[in-house]
Amino acid sequence: MFDILPKRICTGHYCNGSGKASINAAKPGHTSLQIAGVNLLGTYNVKVKTQKPFDGLLPGHVVSGVSYWRVDVNGRLGWAMRWEGSKQPQNTLEIYSRRLLPVTEKNTVTIYGALTRQQCVAFQHEAYKLGHKWFQAHEWLLPQYKRHDAHIIVKQLGDVHGLTVLDFGSCEGQVAHALARGGAEVTATDKRSAILGEAISRHIECQDVAWVSSDKVPEGTWDIVLSLSVWHQMDRSYQHLKGHLDILGSRATKAVYIELMTPPLSGKLDVDAFMAQRGAEKLYTYQHKVRRRRTLYRES
């Protein structure tokens, strides 16, 4: 499945620019160097050995005459850009990122090409054959693979522009990518689907979602923490739900959103009553297309 994913790995050395780009990119209201409305910082210039590093790789975004390719620079997320009509040598990569990259003399840059529509269809079929059947809500999915509408959840979260978000148990990132498009800085975790989710981030959604392959809640703090329709897979009766919520709460500075099966797969816990005792707000309930009713709660 992953052999159809276009990318190129380049090596090169850091080189100084004029210094003006960083100032311009960081100016409030500067619109030509933005992804999802987020001002990007740069430039981090790398002169690579590959003479035409973008050849055969479709950009993930084209905004106001600027083409952007998702890149990893020494394992850090960023965007390589090229202005229409640029006179910059083709093997000099101008890289921008949400956070300034630390200067390193020797660099490894992986450039990811966006998939064509035909490649995207082939990718979905192969993923499904390999058992990845929970794409659920990406807008580009074929009808036979779509099981849920991420807009229900995204609408409840409201404006996330500039916020940091942890999406625990993100599956293939249907909500994570929607929030990244809304300007959030998103970390997504999933033990089984992180590799697939990262491929979607790089080649289809073309968003800078940071992926962690784990079934544990990572250390750190985020403005918002999500746990959406995942806890029933680890705790069928919600016997350990309190401990899970306490951990999520320790990671969130603003709010925790948790979506639960109601009732749980086993046991007799009254989930509404339990969450009400914790002071949680019940936001909505809906019937999932595959199984059971789901309810979204918020703890602030």
Image (cartoon, rainbow, N blue to C red):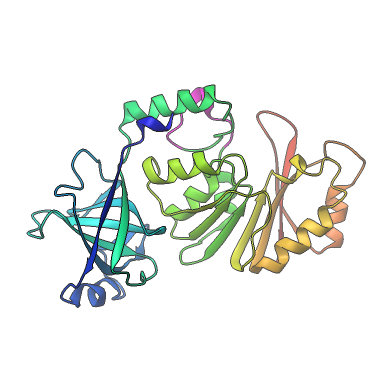
Residue 23: x and y in percent read 25, 77
Residue 147: x and y in percent read 58, 31
Q: Quadrant of the N terminus?
A: top left
Q: Residue at x 54, y 25 (%)?
A: 130
Q: Does residue 173 appear to the left or right of 10 in the view shown? A: right
Q: Residue at x 87, y 55 (%)?
A: 274
How many numbered marks, from 0 up? 0
Q: Residue at x 47, y 45 (%)?
A: 198
The magenta segment is: 139-148
Residue 144 falls within the magenta-colored stretch: yes
Whether residue 132 is visible to the viewer of this picture, yes or no, is yes
**Nearer to the camera, 225 or 37:** 225
Residue 112: x and y in percent read 32, 45
**Nearer to the camera, 5 or 258:** 5
Residue 260: x and y in percent read 74, 45
Q: Does residue 264 appear to the left or right of 66 in the view shown? A: right
Q: Quadrant of the C terminus?
A: bottom right
**Nearer to the camera, 80 or 141:** 80
**Where 45 falls versus 194 (above or below)?**
below
The majority secondary structure of the magenta stretch comes to: loop
Q: Residue at x 20, y 46 (%)?
A: 54
